[in-house]
Amino acid sequence: MEKVVSLAKRRGFVFQSSEIYGGLNGCWDYGPLGVEMLNNLKQAWWRSMTFRDDVEGVDASILMHPKVWEASGHVANFTDPMVDCKQCKSRYRVDVLMDELNTKKKKDVLREMFPGQFDGQQPDEKIVAEFAARIATDETVAQAVRILACPNCGTKGSFTEARQFNLMFKTFVGPVEDSNNVVFLRPETAQGIFVNFLNVQSASRQKLPFGIAQIGKAFRNEINTKNFLFRTREFEQMEMQYFVKPGEEDRFFEYWREERMKWFLELGMKPENLQWHKHEKLAHYAKAAFDIEFKFPFGWGEVEGIHSRTNFDLSQHEQFSGKSLKYFDEQSKEKFVPYVIETSVGASRSFMAFLCASYDEEMVAGADGEAGEVRTVLHLHPKLAPMKAAILPLVNRDGMDDLARNLTKDLQKYFRVFYDDSGAIGRRYRRQDEIGTPYCFTVDSQTLTDQTVTVRERDSMKQERIAMSAVRDYLLERI
């Protein structure tokens, strides 16, 4: 993980926010290459979700009427139990403490809480299953926390009693800071979709089933931020709520599960780095919930959730607003509140997952029996690569630089490309490998005579010559 973070900063993908002031924990800035890759990721998602007949897009306000969050349950229930270590003052979310226990520690907790029932001979799978089943209530979780050692200082039994902590950021509208002017920074983008359900349906004349997609910022005052971009206080979500007739939700739930896994695979994820995690413990309104998890360097972690949310959200907003959100089915001549299938992917987490998945260090053989060298390369899918191509004049004279600059200007009408005339050609190739540029086009002395260029492919490092006039079409076919 350290190597990925180092490359991200060195090459301008991600910087610590407010770094010259010591940084702000849990906040990150995307640099020149990072913002390009993030935009490519969002565009790939947007095209896959909305370039079809049955999904529309919205961009809802970050600030919403406070009753929205009362209706959704966030004001009352968007809390996490939190504990402090009395010894070192570290603060933790209780659920995170539980989730990060390895099998040995889970076994130790079970032995102490249930003497004589766990002798250490049980297989790991049974321990994990027993822990999930037995440490499931508030009472048993609290008992387990009293047994745990603090991950920071190692002191056992040092945690305070758990207390609830609301994760929403609060602010005020207008000049007066009182309870009548309280608003919240949205903790999720979904509610902006739900309150606009009828607006979108009416304006677009959509019929069920149809979806509404949105990309936008969300904010959560996390107790602990960690693992680079994995858990932050400000992040972007890419969400789609798909509205269906009651009784059809199971079919569309399976459809969207398949579609969303396919999206990650088509963008170059290896199947062995992805897995499904089924939620055994569901929210009171949910019928089913699965996560797509990626194998990060620190372990498996969620990148997307697919949820069958029934009609809870629309029904709540109907009740709290006093406005009907029922859909009229012209075919059956009946009114009903639609059920919802949700796909929710973290843009920041996906960015981090694709960065980790593509990072590689490989040995490259030297020429004429010389010792090889290690090259660092990002095997990013061309759709996600921040730069689609690099244009490299072999030398900065004899008209090669002029030809290279003209080619760059022509390609910049269609792609983000990079012009580089500094250093040996091999070193320039390595710089482009490290930022994931899929193709390098070299203008050399032969270009001056026959108007061809050398194209080098990043992953194989194979080279071929093509006509300079064919470069644009060459890229269009592959990006």
Image (cartoon, rainbow, N blue to C red):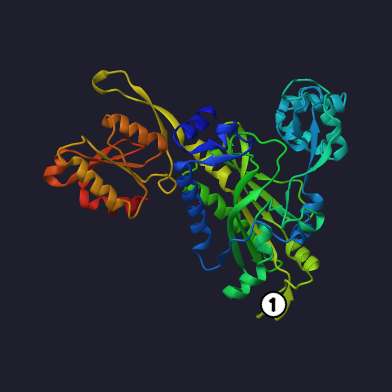
In depth, the one of 284 and 448 nearer the eye is: 448
Q: Amino acid at mark 1?
A: Phe
Residue in view at x 61 percent, y 46 percent: 235
Residue in view at x 40 percent, y 39 percent: 436
Quarter-of-image position of residue 154: top right
Residue carrying label 1: 328
Q: Is residue 250 above or below residue 365?
A: below
Mark 1 nearby-residue class (10 Å; few <14, some 14–19, many ≥20): some
Secondary structure at numbered mark 1: strand
Residue 92 x/y as whole percent: 75, 33
Left or right of 151 on screen, residue 58: left
Instruction: Please identify the quadrant where the N terminus is shown.
Output: top right
Q: Is residue 233 above or below residue 377?
A: below
Quarter-of-image position of residue 159: top right
Residue at the extreme left of the image, as rendered: 449
How many numbered marks have been drawn onto this rendered protein structure? 1
Residue in view at x 42 percent, y 49 percent: 383
In depth, the one of 426 and 311 nearer the eye is: 426
In depth, the one of 232 and 336 nearer the eye is: 232
Residue 32 x/y as whole percent: 45, 42
Left or right of 218 on screen, residue 168: right
Residue in view at x 23 percent, y 44 percent: 404
